[in-house]
């Protein structure tokens, strides 16, 4: 027998919305960053736009996503479940979120140094590294979205 649908309490809806909204904003900021950096071709305005979309959109999106994830995790009482019974999609989500947060921080630092060096005519290589790191983050978050939506066990 299979389950056709599961009903969750209404009190879980808002924390889940916060988590999903934060994840959506995070990915949107990363797409904007990667697009602007990829199509900049040396244009300082687009390079700055790419970096500042990372700072002003992706970073707050990450914070909201992570807070929402912890909130819904505690609402669903997963901390009371023994580790061997926690579904793999939750572990994948936490792994990608935690490592992704560190990688986002590295990306912000590298990009910040690159934008600062733009004033002196340099920083192109650092901003290319920022582009590569943001694409890696996007790929990781696609895996997390797959895990959250597909719920593999």
Image (cartoon, rainbow, N blue to C red):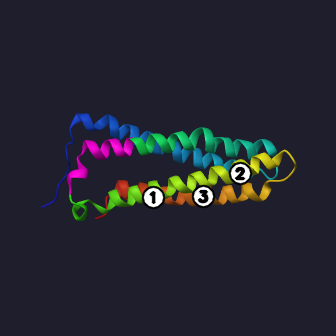
- At mark 1, the secondary structure is helix
- Which secondary structure dominates the residues rendered in magenta? helix
Choose top left, top right, bottom left or bottom right for residue 93: bottom left
Please name whichever residue, 61 or 82, is drawn nearer the observer in this view of the structure.
82
Q: Which mark is residue 105?
A: none
Residue 13 locus on image (x, y percent): 30, 36
Residue 78 is covered by the magenta coloring = yes
User: Could you tell me which residue is drawn at 72 percent across and 58 percent down?
Assistant: 128
Mark 2 = which residue?
37
Q: Earlier in the sequence, mark 1 or mark 3?
A: 1
Question: Label 2 near label 1: C-beta < 8 Å?
Answer: no
Choose top left, top right, bottom left or bottom right for residue 94: bottom left
User: Could you tell me which residue is drawn at 25 percent across and 34 percent down?
Assistant: 11
Mark 3 = which residue?
135
Q: Which residues are magenta?
A: 68-81
Please tell me how crowded label 3 is: few (under 14), some (14-19), or many (20+) other residues with Cα within 10 Å: some
User: Could you tell me which residue is drawn at 67 percent across and 55 percent down?
Assistant: 130
Mark 1 = which residue?
96
Residue 41 locus on image (x, y percent): 80, 53
* Tag nearer the camera, 1 or 2: 1
């Amino acid at each position: 027998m299979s389950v056709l649908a599961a009903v969750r309490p209404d009190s879980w809806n808002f924390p889940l919305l916060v988590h999903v909204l934060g994840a959506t904003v995070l990915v949107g900021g990363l797409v904007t960053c990667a697009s602007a950096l990829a199509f900049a071709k040396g244009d300082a305005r687009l390079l700055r736009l790419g970096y500042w979309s990372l700072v002003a959109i992706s970073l707050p999106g990450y914070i909201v996503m992570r807070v929402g994830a912890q909130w819904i995790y505690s609402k669903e009482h997963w901390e009371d479940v023994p580790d061997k019974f926690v579904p793999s999609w939750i572990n994948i989500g936490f792994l990608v979120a935690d490592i992704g947060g560190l990688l986002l921080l590295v990306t912000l630092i590298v990009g910040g140094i690159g934008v600062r060096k733009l004033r002196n005519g340099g920083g192109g290589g650092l901003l290319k590294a920022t582009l590569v790191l943001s694409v890696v983050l996007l790929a990781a978050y696609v895996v997390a979205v797959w895990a959250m939506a597909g719920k593999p066990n």
